[in-house]
Amino acid sequence: MGAVVRTAPAQVRIWFDGDLEPAFSRLTVTDAAGKQVDRGDSGVAPDNHRLLQIALPPLAPGVYKVTWSVLAVDGHRTEGDYRFTLKPQ
């Protein structure tokens, strides 16, 4: 189960407890049908190598899945996902 929001986010940002390898870290956002809805600009923030982020277009109400896969500079790989629901205003 994930968060329920009433205002569409402009981006998704996930902070990690260690620095990430930018070339091997990514983030995607898909809708309930599995269609990718993000702007395709996933990346590690240039000024904070512990922050993975991606921009979103205006979203319609519905359920969305955030999926991430990262490689830490120490060589540890991790991945995961969570969902959020955008409710109509």
Image (cartoon, helix red, strand yellow):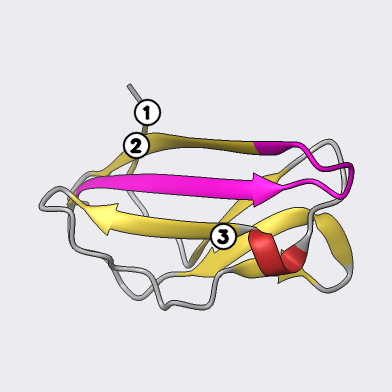
Asked if residue 51 lies left or right of residue 55, the reply is right
Q: Which residues are magenta?
A: 63-77
Cα distance in 3D space between marks 2 and 3:
17 Å
Of the two numbered discs 3 and 1 on the same chain, state the one appearing first in sequence.
1
Q: Amino acid at mark 2?
A: Arg
Label 2 vs label 3, nearer the camera: 3
In the displayed structure, would residue 54 be above or below residue 68? below
Q: Name the residue located 81 percent from the left edge and 43 percent from the top edge.
A: 75
- The local crowd at label 1, few if under 14, some if 14 to 19, many if 20 or more residues have their Cα within 10 Å, is few
Label the magenta part by its dominant secondary structure: strand
Can residue 8 be seen?
Answer: no
Q: Are marks 2 and 1 in contact (CB under 8 Å)?
A: yes
Q: Residue at x 53, y 78 (%)?
A: 41
Spatial CA span between label 2 and label 1? 5 Å
Percent x, y of residue 61: 18, 54
Task: Say left or right for 8 vs 25.
Answer: left
> Is 32 displayed left or right of 85 in the figure?
left
Residue under pointer 1: 2
- Vertical placement of residue 55 versus 66, above or below: below
Name the mark nearer the viewer: 3 or 1: 3
Residue position for label 3: 26
Give the quadrant of residue 77. Answer: top right
Cα separation, mark 3 vs mark 1, equals 20 Å
Dot 2 corresponds to which residue? 83
Q: Residue at x 32, y 21 (%)?
A: 1
Q: Is residue 42 visible?
A: yes
Horizontal and vertical percent for residue 68? 52, 47
Q: Residue at x 71, y 48 (%)?
A: 71
How crowded pointer 3 is (Cα within 10 Å; few <14, some 14-19, many 20+) is rated as many
- Name above or below for residue 40 compared with residue 86: below
